Image (cartoon, grey):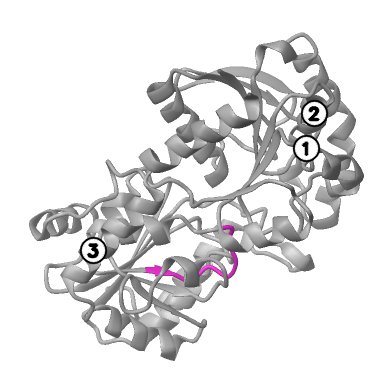
Amino acid sequence: MKFLVVSSKYCPEYSGSGLRAHNTHKRLHGKFFTSFDVVTSSLENKGVKKYTYNDVNVVRISGVFIPAKFKGFLQKIIIWFNFPFEVFRCWLFIRTRIDQYSLLHTFGNSWSVGFFTWYFAKYHKPVVRELCNDIPSPYYPKRFEYLMRPIFQKENSMVIAISPMLENMAKSHQVKHVWQRPNPVDEDKFYLRSKEEKLRLRAELTQFKKNDIVMTSVANFSQRKNQEFLLSVLERLPSKYKLVLAGVMHDDTEGGRKGKKVATSAEYVQNIRKIIQKYNLSNRVQINTGFVNNPQEYMSLSDIYLFPSTHEGLGTPILESQACGVPVVANYLPGITDFWIKNGTGGYVCELNPEIWSKAVIKALDIQSQTLSINSEYILSKSSSDVIDKEYMNLFKKIID
């Protein structure tokens, strides 16, 4: 099998969905001898570029303007100006290659995702679309829904929803075939570690000590990820509670929904630092800005993992941290956190109230290690990459045949 993977962003330009697209198809290639090419879009570049990333052939098709240089409504106008260029370049790419590919697999929203979906369907080729974010419709581009909707009524099309919330949304839009599954958790990275290993990682990666109670959150610094809220929680806890915030400074294109003004990532981190000074928390908070290629180590060194995001497609860290045997305190996101976190077993789910959260953090510490171990086994039985990859291949074979 040879797949065409189309993603709105792809490595090295960071996005969670782009990184998962890369990792997923690298694993499938290694396990099942599949092959794949990648076409990606970009908000941070212009023009067309061919490159190789980790032995993967990538073609980046961007417009004549760089949308990331603009904000708000002007950015939307620029994206529309780029539309004819991107579609034309996508057509030039695929017109002589369509017969090479067994299936189209798309991630995110971009003009290339929409065009290739239509083009593969035109040639009766299977189409698989992954819903990665909290979005109002499974179809993209929204203005061309009348073209997209019939495609996902066909037998050889499939929408993959990474949470029950997204599954319900897709079904409400009459998508015929929906596979609901969590993002895969790499069982070779996310697993139970010994107490000695936990303390070693803590000493290597943080300024905190053996007797501290360390809470961690690993995420892009953005208003949607809501790290700022955690400072209000920390302020209400005794001084032995410490907080590690780690993640890349990257402007969040999902953060400005519903016309809300969104601070840049740099502005957001600057505001976090001001609040730390205001609350006199400097010796209790560690901030690491930069790409985190070892989130499993940050989770394992922790006593509690915190997940205060205001909206998500899933939130893979809530699975990964539980796989590491670390309880999670998370914002209540219906069909997501309440589905994957069992109160008193894998952590606690509660509304975004600092007082309630501080009490939940203390309660999470009382969850027995044996309970966390059993919960880790359960999470991996449902979401390990080995389990998910086998289901992927069964799905692909079914709709290709």
Residue 188 position in % (x across, y down): 27, 41
- The answer to whether residue 115 of the structure is visible from this angle is yes
Q: Point out the tag, 1 or 3, that comes first from the N-terminus.
A: 1
Q: Main secondary structure of the magenta part?
A: loop
Q: Look at the picture and state if 239 lies above or below 89.
A: below
Kindly report the distance in space between the C-alpha atoms of the residues bearing marks 2 and 3.
Answer: 44 Å
Q: Is residue 167 left or right of residue 238?
A: right
Say whether residue 260 is left or right of residue 131: right
Q: For mark 2, what is the residue?
A: 121
Q: Are marks 2 and 3 in contact (CB under 8 Å)?
A: no
Q: Nearer the viewer, residue 204 or 318?
A: 318
Q: Height in image: 104 above or below 366?
A: above
Query: Which residue shows up at 61% across the image and 53% down it?
Result: 251
Q: Secondary structure at mark 1?
A: loop
Callout 3: SS: helix
Left/right of residue 391 with respect to residue 75 in the rendered view: left
Kindly identify the amino acid type of the residue bearing the numbered disc 3: Ile
In space, the residues marked 1 and 3 are separated at their CA atoms by 41 Å
Of the image marks 1 and 2, the number of the one nearer the N terminus: 2
Q: Which residue is mark 1?
A: 154
State how far apart marks 1 and 2 are (Cα).
9 Å
Q: Magenta stretch?
A: 306-313
Magenta run includes residue 297 = no
> Residue 9 in the image: x percent, y percent?
62, 37
Front-most of 71 and 274? 71
Horizontal and vertical percent position of residue 193: 17, 54
Q: Position of residue 156 (x, y in %)?
A: 71, 33
Q: Decide whether residue 310 is among the magenta residues.
A: yes
Q: Are marks 1 and 2 in contact (CB under 8 Å)?
A: yes
Amino acid type assigned to the residue bearing label 1 in the image: Lys
Q: Which residue is the site of mark 3?
A: 374
